[in-house]
Amino acid sequence: MINSIQTVDMIVIGGGINGMAIAGQAACKGLKVVLIEQNDIASGTSSKSTQLIHGGLRYLQQCDFSLVRKALKERTVLMKMAPHLIKPMEFIIPDYKQTTPHWLTRLGLFVYDHLSGHNPLPKAHKLGLSTAPYHSFLRKDIQQGLVYSDAVTHDSRLVMEWALLAKQHQAVVLNYQSIIALTEEDTGWQVMLADRTYQATMLVNATGPWVTRFHQQYFPSLDIPKMNLVKGSHLVLKKELPDNKSYLLECADGRIIFLTPYEPGYSLLGTTELEYGGSLENITVEQTEIAYLLQSVNVYLQNPLQEKDIVARFAGVRPLVDDGLHNAHQLSRDYHLQLQQGTKGHLLLSVLGGKLTTHRRLAEEALILLQKNSASWPQHSDAFFVLPGGEPLDEAVFMQTYSFIPTPILARYLRSYGTLCLSWLKGTKTLDALGTYFGAGLYQAEVEYLLKEEWVKTVEDLLWRRTRLGLSLDEIDVEKLKETIKQHVHPQ
């Protein structure tokens, strides 16, 4: 039964990185916002990336200098906004049988550093690879390479912190909500859910790979550019990388893949790029992709990786605007914002394409576009400088204050939550005060925080998107955690 129609300024459909950044920035500007996600927050492409905040070195090969420059500028901004989540990373390019000449790679790195402007990261330089710690990891005939700097993140936690920012500014964030109906009325767009209806004069379609399907279902009379869906698959390996550095590796077909640190003791290998026309609800990693990734990385390694080293795998689909000229890996990763009006004049914004690194800039431009075309826009504007959890924190004092907690757990708290972890740690004096232990460093206090504040509804939400503890929690502990979540979500 529908209670009543709740009027807001903006309805955002889609809880990935772009939709959540739009909702967060809009809420900061004083708009009344509701965001609706059909599954979990960041459950689609936004939790299945290569985890990079980067300019995109390979986009230089396509002469997409504007995208690289824009992304590099955003890299600097985002590192300041979320210093706990986005960390500098050095990437090694081994000099070994590449189809790209060594001199051209060096030139590309020079241009890359030049486009980044004034940034705190080290410039590209040569690196000897014949001594420790690389000599036992890479092939013995790989003697040298180049190293450059970029940044890495935990993608789904980045989305979550935009959600928390939106909530802090009174936005309503809903996950696991199916749209019953969507209509345009004289008073605005009306989105009917199972137990409530929201109305707004601005509607944002930020559904990622579903953008075309959503548009055609609810706005069949309005055109939308053709999208090309590209699948990228990743493998999580039980393998620690020497000196905690990442690798950019050129494949035999001219593509590049990344091998990067993931969690302590684990690394991430990816990605493939295949045109995709299958189900968006069941995206899997194919055996041919596993073979491709392993074969490509093993060209460089002294001890080849095998399938038994794979502990997890995931695949996501990225929507790219189809230019009709290029294949999957050559299509631009830049975004396109399409603003239209419904039959009654209300605004519909469709978010097309984009990449993790440029999400903040995308959201900013989306709001400027909407504001220019909106009849009413709140005068209030609330600036923000860091995402929740990114406030300054003296790590040495933190580690000393909570020294009764094992150091690996405290380190995970810092890199995953920043200052947010103080919401359950503040005032605790003993390990017992954290409550029931579920294994793998997970205590009841953290679980209760995630259930109360971060929209957790299932064990997968908690173990694979809010944290990555699904890599190390055993089946018995998972079942115990499932029961705890069930009791919270569906109390008797």
Image (spheres, helix red, strand yellow):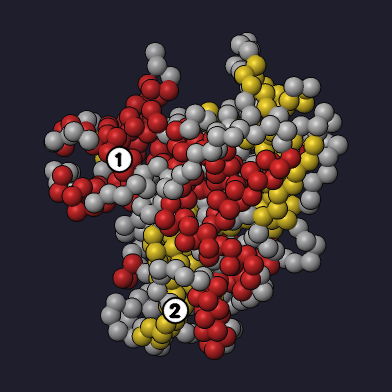
Amino acid type of disc 2?
Ala
The alpha-carbon separation of the residues under discs 1 and 2 comes to: 35 Å
> Which image quadrant for residue 22?
top right
User: Would you say residue 408 is visible in this rendering?
Assistant: no
- Residue 124 has which mark? 2
Q: Position of residue 307 (x, y in %)?
A: 45, 61
Residue 71 is tagged as none
Neighbourhood count class around disc 2 (C-alpha, 10 Å): few under 14, some 14–19, many 20 upward: some
| SS type, badge 2 | loop
Task: Report which quarter residue 115 is drawn in.
Answer: bottom right
Mark 1 lies on residue: 421
Q: Quadrant of the C terminus?
A: top left
Residue lying furthest front in this view? Answer: 379
Q: Nearer the viewer, residue 202 or 332?
A: 202
Instruction: Please rate how many residues cluster around mark 1, counting C-alpha atoms within 10 Å: few if below 14, some from 14 to 19, many from 20.
Output: some
How far from the left and from the top, in percent, is residue 211? 70, 43
Whether 447 is drawn above or below 18: the answer is above
x, y percent for residue 217: 77, 34
Residue at 38% in and 54% down: 83
Q: Quarter of the image for the N terminus: give it.
A: top right
The residue tagged with tag 1: helix, strand or loop? helix
Q: Is residue 62 visible?
A: yes
At label 1, which amino acid type do we have? Cys
- The reply to whether dot 1 and dot 2 touch (C-beta < 8 Å) is no
Q: Is residue 366 above or below residue 425?
A: below
Residue sitting at 46 percent across and 44 percent down? 384
Q: Nearer the viewer, residue 79 or 415?
A: 79
